[in-house]
Amino acid sequence: MSLVASQYPEEDKRSKVMGFVLGSIAVGVLAGYPMGSVLYDLEGKMAPFLLVASFIVLLIALQLFVLDFNPTKGQSTTERSSWTHLLLDTRILIIAGAIWFSTTPMAILEPCLPIWLRSHIKPKKWQLGTVFIPDSVGYLLGTNFFGVIAYRYGRCKTAVLAMLLVGLSAMTIPAAGSMSQLIIPHLGLGLGIGVADAALVPLLASLVDQTGGYGPVYSIQQIAVSLAYSLGPIASGELVQSIGFPWVMRVAGLANVAYCPLLIYLALRRRRDPLAQQERKERYDSFEPAAAAAQKQQQHAKYERFYDSDDGL
């Protein structure tokens, strides 16, 4: 993500490309499960890993030919982009917390949902492998199509709606009585997480554009995801035994809903930020309707007829 942020300084292009990169995670999940199972059945357990290793070698070769490894010369901003400086920034902490909270329901579902399904719905074995497909589809749609939308209408506002969707979807998953009834909540959960990532991940880059500290800020973002996938299963495993799986998901959903006021506070704070005001002006100018632009050009041409070339001397 830090590489994308440095290669695409324009906010609209950055939002679009980052959404595309985030969506590749969902593509890997959608293609990896069936491809791995087919190769395992046909060629054995080594085949999927050999294929993945071949792709990695190919990507490394492409990076060696395409990427520029020469460090860019600029002013030293080590102090302003250090870990301590970024962790003291409440804006970055709020965004990292939102990513943590929105990812936690999925981290809880991965170890706990199959056990709960076997005891309550009793699906077939092949159905257990397909239960997370709607999440991947929703995440793919959210990251690929909502990056530019979040930039246009406000990233914090979009993230609030996304976390509300994550919370409601997480709370409705335990109410499902069949595998088909899980499709809509899982799709909503993946869509909400994807929209939240598409809105908040580019926002982190815009907060450190002045210092160029993309590496440290995206390390914090990855730590938030790692905390969700490490603490989520550990805490949920203990809580499921005491309060049950349905209440664990309800608590996770309510936590996402309760976190939304912090994003609203961040949106109000960014509204008073001079850099954010300039960003909004550029954003609306870049999305100026074609008819209005043509009308301005026509008016300019109309007044240009009365312009004497000698006046410019």
Image: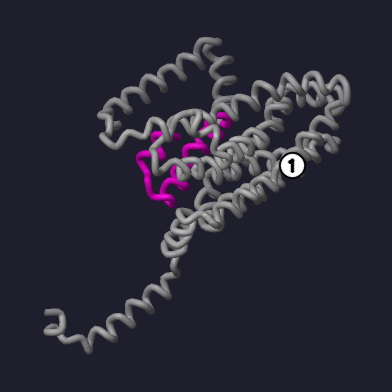
* 3, 33: nearer the viewer: 3
Q: Residues within 10 Å of mark 1 (few under 14, many from 20)?
A: many
Classify residue 139 by image quadrant. Answer: top right
What range is drawn magenta here? 1-30
Above or below — where is 264 with respect to 310? above
Classify residue 305 as left or right of residue 84: left
List x then y, in percent, for residue 180: 78, 38
* 193, 279: nearer the viewer: 279
List x then y, in percent, for residue 165: 71, 46
Q: Is the stretch drawn in magenta largely helix, strand or loop?
A: helix
* 225, 117: nearer the viewer: 225
Identify which residue is drawn at 63% across, 25% down.
227
Q: Is label 1 in a helix, a strand or a loop?
A: helix
Tell which residue pokes out farthest to the bottom in this image.
306
Classify residue 117 by image quadrant. Answer: top right
Any part of residue 183 in sight? no
Identify which residue is drawn at 65% across, 39% down.
190
In the image, is residue 56 part of the stretch drawn in magenta? no
List x then y, in percent, for residue 63: 32, 27
Identify which residue is drawn at 36% across, 34% down.
77
User: Dot 1 corresponds to which residue?
Assistant: 167
Classify residue 108 by image quadrant. Answer: top right
In the image, is residue 12 part of the stretch drawn in magenta? yes
List x then y, in percent, for residue 71: 27, 30
Classify residue 181 as left or right of residue 296: right
Identify which residue is drawn at 43% across, 46% down.
14
Classify residue 26 as left or right of residue 172: left
Classify residue 60 as left or right of residue 234: left
